[in-house]
Image (cartoon, rainbow, N blue to C red):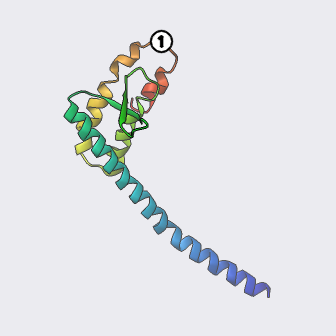
Amino acid sequence: MKNFCLTLAGMSLGVFVGCTPKVANDIISENIKNAVEHYSLQTDLIEKNGQILNSRTLNESKDIVYGSYDNSTNGFFPGSMWYLLNLTSDKTWEALVVKYTEALESVQYFTRHYDVGFIAGCSL
């Protein structure tokens, strides 16, 4: 009985371990693809506007709300693009990443609240 239980446990572990990497890779790949699609749509909208804006949230009408660069979450948008550049190695992100990160340069002089590191940390 002891040998049976050990064999069953070993087989179960083998099946679990054997399936995990493929499932994990599929989930990661799908999430990266989803992020690329969403950030591509977002940057297309921003670039057509002609201004460098950071998306902050959606309002009740599901319209994109943009924030100013002194808002504590506005480093997240260019920071996420840095991650996309790193994850995809797609050089089309490179110019956008630099452009949106450079737009945060004025944050270094911001003194209204203590969130400067939080604002710039993801991007710089």
Disc 1 target residue: 112
Q: In the visual, does 54 lie left or right of 117?
A: left
For label 1, the crowd category at 10 Å Cα-Cα, with few meaning under 14, some 14 to 19 and many 20 or more, is few
Residue, x 43% and y 57% (percent of image)? 28
Residue, x 63% and y 81% (percent of image)? 11
- Residue 86: quadrant of the picture: top left
Can the viewer see residue 94?
Answer: no
Can the viewer see residue 107?
Answer: yes
Total numbered labels: 1
Q: Which of 45 and 116 is in front in this view?
A: 45
Q: In the visual, does 31 lie left or right of 19?
A: left
- Identify the image quadrant of the N terminus: bottom right
Element assignment for label 1 = loop
- Identify the image quadrant of the C terminus: top left
- Going by the numbered disc 1, the residue's amino acid type is Arg
Question: In the current view of this chain or complex, which residue is farthest to the right?
Answer: 1
Residue 112 x/y as whole percent: 47, 12
Image: 19 above or below 42: below
Residue 65 x/y as whole percent: 37, 32
Q: Nearer the viewer, residue 5 or 45?
A: 45
Residue, x 38% and y 35% (percent of image)? 77
Q: Which of 119 and 17 is in front in this view?
A: 119
Residue 74 x/y as whole percent: 41, 29
